[in-house]
Image (cartoon, rainbow, N blue to C red):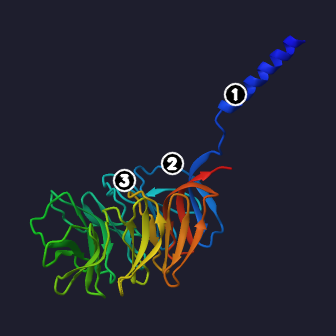
Amino acid sequence: MKRYLYITTILGLMLLLNSCLTEPSYPPIEPWLCSINADGTGFRKIKKSPFNTPGLVDIYMTKDNRIIFYGEKLWISETDSISIIPITPFDLKVHSAPGLEFTRDGGTAFFAANRDFYQLSMETFELVKITDTPVDFRYAEPTISDDERYLTGRGYSAKSKDAQRVAYYIDLLDYSSGYIYTKFWIPSPYKTKIMTGLNKLFIVNRDGFASVSLSDSTYTLHLPYNADWGNPFQTSADNRFILTECPQAYSRLAIAIDLNDFTRCELGTIHSNVGREPIKACKEANTVFYFNDRHLYKYDLDTHTKSTVLGEDKIGEIYMIAPTWDGSKVHFYADIVNR
């Protein structure tokens, strides 16, 4: 009898020890393309990743609420049922830094590929190369001006001998090109945007947020901070705010810069991955969406109010977002906790 009690005790201790050594089980996490209404309702898992979109780095919404996948190529799909169609040719490699600009009517998009800028019809997907880039150079990250006449972009892989040369631009009326200069040398810009209504070229460089006068080439540093090349550079629907980020000691901070008086409004911390755009401004609503690792936020630029669209109870991590133009819904990639 004592022997059986001894064996039972030993087995019990072994089971207890095994339970202590066994790792606890966690709910599985799966990558999904999802959507949610801007008020936090209507959360929906649309389709589990991966898709056939090599090099995917970001997503964008069209005016008619289709979704564009930005990777080595551009693909498009309806959102209710994902059926991906390539809209750029197989021999055209899209630039790795995400940048897709639309005209206000939604009919035309601009992007960089194979060292040049391209214009894409969103109705016929007809593609037109609008630059003729030198061999030792490439342009990327196009930004359209407030009056939609000019396109500026960031130059890569070449050193200009002209220290005062700040930005390359294309006149979209006739596809002629030129440069914008300053009176003195300044650090090279990371992002640029012509605002003809304010007669300025706005830039972000290593010193922070600045502008160059289009009339007399004067450079003015409006907000000094340690910017870097990966900072987003979105414009609000009313062209009053530039949405970008300001690095902090251990995080990054989403900010809205008022172009009327250059005051800075702090929106909140954002995702630290510089390969994607963690801030997206709506095209037709004065609203901006941004995310950090496990939260999606909405910020109303008219009332300066912030709300949480999605919290960490449903997700493991958000990777990229694409709000609709009217700001009513957001599509996003995320790791979803499968409870």
- Residue that protrudes farthest toward the left in the picture: 161
Nearest to the eye among marks 2 and 1: give it: 1
**In terms of secondary structure, where does tag 3 sit?**
loop
Q: Earlier in the sequence, mark 2 or mark 1?
A: 1
User: Up-down: is 20 above or below 286?
Assistant: above
- Residue 21 in the figure: left or right of residue 207: right
* Disc 3 crowd, CA 10 A, few/some/many (<14, 14-19, 20+): some
User: Up-down: is 314 above or below 40?
Assistant: above
Q: Earlier in the sequence, mark 1 or mark 3?
A: 1
- Residue 160 in the figure: left or right of residue 214: left
Q: Measuring 40% from the left and 64% from the top, which residue is drawn there?
A: 248
Q: Give residue 62's position: percent from left, percent from top.
A: 47, 70
Q: Label 1: which residue?
A: 18
User: Up-down: is 36 above or below 303?
Assistant: above
Q: Label 2: which residue?
A: 50
* Disc 1 crowd, CA 10 A, few/some/many (<14, 14-19, 20+): few
Q: Earlier in the sequence, mark 3 or mark 2?
A: 2
Which residue type carries mark 3? Glu
Q: Give residue 218's position: percent from left, percent from top.
A: 18, 82
- Residue 19 in the figure: left or right of residue 276: right
Mark 2 vs mark 1, CA separation in Å = 37 Å
Q: Give residue 169's position: percent from left, percent from top.
A: 22, 74
- Residue that protrudes farthest toward the front in the picture: 2
- Residue 30 in the figure: left or right of residue 267: right
* Disc 2 crowd, CA 10 A, few/some/many (<14, 14-19, 20+): few
Mark 1 vs mark 3, CA separation in Å = 48 Å
Which residue type carries mark 1? Asn
Q: Which numbered tag is attached to residue 72? A: 3
**In terms of secondary structure, where does tag 2 sit?**
loop
* Residues at circles 1 and 3 in contact by the CB criterion of under 8 Å: no
